[in-house]
Image (cartoon, helix red, strand yellow):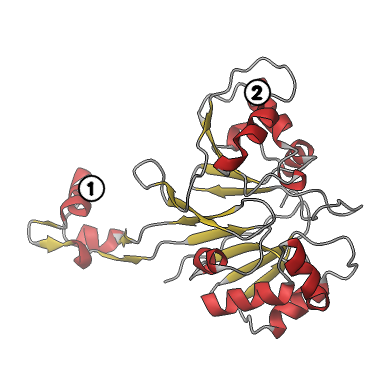
């Protein structure tokens, strides 16, 4: 959690910025102003980043991009970094990418999101990265990461059947080996999922992103008393976020993107609980780490 404020930062909350570290991949979501410094404070290096995902082009979600992009080149990050963002904002991305002159050495690959759907599949990542359209005042997309289901090999059962070395991989690929079935020496390994939902009203995309998620990071800019203001400005309330999480079977709900008008963070948790959410709940704070829930058995 690099930053958890909404439009206006506060003494305790920086503009947006979130990094998901997952099996060697580092995805930076919505880098607002101050993201570089927050990364330094959290021990997240430019080399850790493999993707950048922008939900939309309002300043509190993207004005930190120029510094991050230049940092990739300054640190000579050796691997490609892919950037996803609404295709309708291509001109804004171009301006942010080249906001000032610098010596560009990083391999930043632009992959604009033109429509809902899969952005990257397991043939290039250990998961599927997809996008769904949101309902904000400007074009916006949310992102979802979904692992495929697999199987966990049991060393004891493998040894009992005399299967070692390269034969383990062969058994995984072919499903059986010398009369031993894959299910005889392994157990199901459910894939995990993560969703990132920023500035939006309630819409089909919110529910599609949240469905069955192990972790949902979602904006809750307003409290229910300001529900009309939330709708007019294209945002969610904490109660709405909690209801979505409850209806979608989310395991860990992370609320963020808080308006500066509220001084009591516990009010957001209270509203999410009142909406019926019973899972693990975090009211995000700057410069904290939130672990993804352990894999379902």
User: Visible in this render: residue 293?
Assistant: no
> First in sequence: mark 2 or mark 1?
2
Residue 239 vertical placement versus 100 (above, below): below
Nearer the observer, disc 2 or disc 1? 2
Residues marked 2 and 1 touching at CB (< 8 Å): no
Point 53% across, 59% down: residue: 194
Callout 2 secondary element: loop
Outermost residue, left side:
178
- Asked where in the image residue 210 lies, by quadrant, the reply is bottom right
- Asked where in the image residue 226 lies, by quadrant, the reply is bottom right
Q: Quadrant of the C terminus?
A: bottom left
- Distance between the Cα atoms at labels 2 and 1? 37 Å
- Label 2 environment density (alpha carbons within 10 Å; few <14, some 14–19, many ≥20): few
Q: State the residue position of label 1.
A: 169
User: Is 33 situated left or right of 206 in this image?
Assistant: right
Give the image location of residue 64, x and y in percent.
74, 37
Give the image location of residue 145, x and y in percent.
49, 55
- On residue 75, which mark appears? 2
User: Is 52 situated left or right of 282 in this image?
Assistant: left
Callout 1 secondary element: helix
Point 54% across, 69% down: residue: 207
């Amino acid at each position: 959690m690099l930053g958890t404020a909404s439009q206006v930062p506060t003494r305790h909350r920086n503009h947006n910025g979130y990094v998901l570290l997952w099996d060697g991949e580092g995805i930076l979501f919505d880098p607002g102003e101050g993201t570089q410094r927050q990364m330094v404070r959290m021990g997240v290096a430019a080399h850790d980043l493999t993707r950048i995902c922008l939900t939309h082009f309002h300043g509190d979600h993207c004005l930190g991009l120029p510094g991050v992009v230049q940092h990739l080149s300054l640190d000579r990050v050796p691997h490609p970094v892919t950037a996803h963002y609404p295709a309708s904002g291509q001109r804004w991305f171009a301006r942010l990418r080249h906001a000032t002159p610098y010596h560009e050495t990083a391999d930043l690959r632009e992959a604009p999101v033109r429509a809902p759907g899969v952005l990257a599949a397991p043939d290039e990542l250990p998961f599927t990265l997809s996008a769904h359209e949101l309902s904000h005042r400007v074009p916006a997309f949310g992102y979802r990461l979904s692992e495929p289901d697999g199987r966990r090999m049991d060393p004891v059962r493998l040894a009992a059947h005399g299967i070692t070395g390269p034969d383990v991989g062969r058994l995984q690929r072919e499903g059986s080996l010398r009369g031993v079935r894959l299910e005889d020496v392994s157990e199901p390994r459910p894939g995990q999922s993560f969703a990132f939902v920023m500035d939006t009203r309630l819409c089909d995309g919110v529910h599609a992103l949240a469905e069955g998620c192990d972790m949902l990071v979602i904006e809750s800019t307003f409290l229910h008393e300001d529900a009309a203001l939330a709708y007019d400005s294209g945002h969610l309330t904490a109660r709405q976020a909690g209801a979505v999480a409850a209806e979608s079977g989310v395991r860990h709900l992370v609320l963020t993107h808080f308006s500066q008008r509220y001084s009591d963070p516990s009010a957001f948790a209270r509203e999410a609980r009142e909406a019926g959410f019973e899972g693990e709940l975090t009211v995000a704070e700057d410069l904290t780490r939130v672990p993804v829930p352990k894999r379902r058995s």
